[in-house]
Amino acid sequence: MKKVLITGILGQDGANMAEYLTLGRAPGDDEETDVEVYGMMRRTSNANFGNIESFKDHPRFNLVCGDLTDEVSIDKLVKEIEPDYFINFGANSFVGCSWDMPLQVFDVNTLGVIRCLESLRKFKPDCKFYSAGSSEELGDVDYSPQDIKHPIKARSPYGAAKAAARHIVKVYRESYDMFAIHSILFNHEGIRRGEEFVTRKITKAVARIKYSINKGEKFDPLQLGNVNAKRDWSDSQDFVKAVWLMLNQEEPKEYVLSSNETHSVKEFVSKAFQAADINGLWSGESLDEKFRVFQENTILAEINEDFYRPAEVELLYGDSSPARKELGWKPDISFDMLVERMVKHDLAIAERSNAT
């Protein structure tokens, strides 16, 4: 049975990948080719296991401890598990905070990748390695849609760290003949998304406001930064399927994963409130722009300049046509479906929490 080591197991992507490989069916798999999954987490006293609840007791899932900042722990796992696949979803992935802790971001997102590659080079060189990249590497884009050949123009420490990781993966692939790939993932969300990310911030606020409206209670409006920024949003559950296809190619090749559509944060807000049966309208300009209940003056969302980034990426819009053509992959979850799923999920959480 093949063995898969996944970092970032408690996060959105790691959990979705592990769920897909245990409860889902990977392309071409049958009972004889099932994989055994090892999910790596950092040892901490306040870990949240909610994202792995659906599969944590599965007989082919194992939870192990390790840290991308500690090569000793990575070496130990690689030697003990001898993985056939090493999927690195572990990262400090909140772009906004990367200006406040750039050294820590590089330690995890760049040096962490080097530690993984070095461990495989020394102890399991035939293991297939995947490292998740980001459209933030592209930064101030030259053209749209962006493909895998777009130049690196990162505008945040996070984007720069991911770009450095991409280059070191290439170095190890070419220097040591390793199967190592680093794909560009455009924005991908879902019901497992962390609450610090703007999409989940929006859907949780919608659920909170919907509950308050139903109860006839006052509420604080949702506060956001640059609502005109445009992103290419997909569901993480679609992306992990593509990652597995990439890892099962005969030769390592990198791709862009995206929906091939772009939507503004403003559009995401409108769709999210619509999913909760609240119709609103944007009005005003710049810092005075607000989202109000249609034909009422009730403010649902407003701009707060404290949430603006030091350097903003205004447009990200991917071209995943090579991945679709060569891997036979296509996303199943549309933008509208993604927003609705996230809102319904957070509405259900709000209902349960307020019922107790």
Image: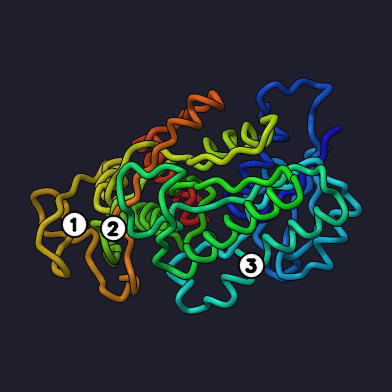
Query: What's under tag 1, amino acid-wise?
Result: Phe
Q: Residue 307 versus residue 77: which sits nearer the camera?
A: 77
Query: What's under tag 2, amino acid-wise?
Result: Glu
| Mark 2 or mark 1: whose residue is earlier in sequence | 1
The residue tagged with tag 1: helix, strand or loop? strand
- Residue at 52% in and 59% down: 163
Return the x and y of residue 93 as percentages of the image width and height.
53, 62
Q: Is residue 261 above or below residue 328?
A: below
Relative horizontal placement of residue 137, taking residue 85 as reference (left or right)? left
Quadrant of the rendering where the N terminus is positioned: top right
Return the x and y of residue 309 as percentages of the image width and height.
34, 71
Q: Residues within 10 Å of mark 1 (few under 14, many from 20)?
A: many
| Mark 3 or mark 1: whose residue is earlier in sequence | 3
Label 2 sits on residue? 314
Front: mark 3 or 1: 3
Distance between mark 3 and mark 1 Cα atoms: 38 Å
Label 3 sits on residue? 108
Q: Residue 212 versus residue 2: which sits nearer the camera?
A: 2
Label 1 sits on residue? 291
Q: From where the camera sits, is residue 349 visible?
A: yes
